Amino acid sequence: MFKRAIALALLCWTSPVFAHGITSGAGFITGLNHPVLGFDHLLAMLSVGLLSTQLGGKAIWRVPLAFMAFMLVGGVLGLFAIEVPFVEIGIALSVLLLGGAIALEKRIPTLAAMAFVGLFAIFHGHAHGAEMPALASPVLYALGFLSGTALIHICGVALGVIMQNITAKLPVTRVVGVAIAATGGYLLMGF
């Protein structure tokens, strides 16, 4: 009986063959892929997890949730083609400044960190919303990019915890922050 239940669950979970690439279909997978496969998005969202770990306490979940909430607002703006100026520059700047914040290892109030990441989340969300495929369900697509973002934040928090244990001997967190900031600077040079 248990084997049949698993087989049925797998059958329901599988998606139909994509005859037209990953942009067709309901949109969850496409939404999930956008933050995971976009290098600039990936770095910024990992940085949010790392930063929240540095701040500790309730910031570990409040800062990433603030990012996701504001990203959803940006996604709705992008979906409805409401212009947000300098989206790509804002995304590159988020990588630079989040990396810099990690490298500096400064303690800032949780509310300030939430506002800081929230501002950048609007740019990331706008890019997600504006790039939603025409055939995608907006709700499933949004659930996809929110799920992908949550997964990246969790990875950032896990990396942060690991690096805090290593940092007692080596300045790993600072080095990673500098590398992320340098990547953000490189991305900004493209504009």
Image (cartoon, grey):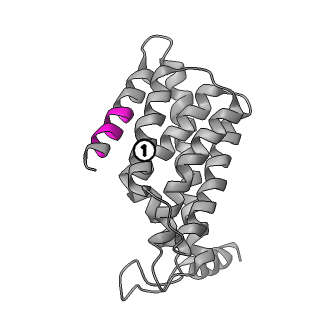
Quadrant assignment, res 180: top left
Q: Which residues are magenta?
A: 180-187
Q: Amino acid at mark 1?
A: Leu
Furthest residue in direction bottom, as rendered: 19
Which element carries disc 1, helix, strand or loop? helix
- Percent x, y for residue 189? 26, 43
Q: Vertical placement of 131 versus 182: above or below?
A: below
Q: Quadrant of the N terminus?
A: bottom right
The chief SS type of the magenta part is: helix
Going 69% across and 72% down the picture, which residue do you hit? 2
Q: Which residue is mark 1?
A: 43
**Taking 109 as reference, is 123 left or right?**
left
Going 56% across and 39% down the picture, which residue do you hit? 49
- Percent x, y for residue 120? 53, 47
Q: Is residue 181 magenta?
A: yes
Q: Residues within 10 Å of mark 1 (few under 14, many from 20)?
A: many
Going 60% across and 69% down the picture, which residue do you hit? 76
5 or 65, nearer to the observer: 65
Q: Vertical placement of 66 versus 140: above or below?
A: above
**Taking 78 as reference, is 42 left or right?**
left
22 or 110, nearer to the observer: 110
Going 44% across and 84% down the picture, which residue do you hit? 24
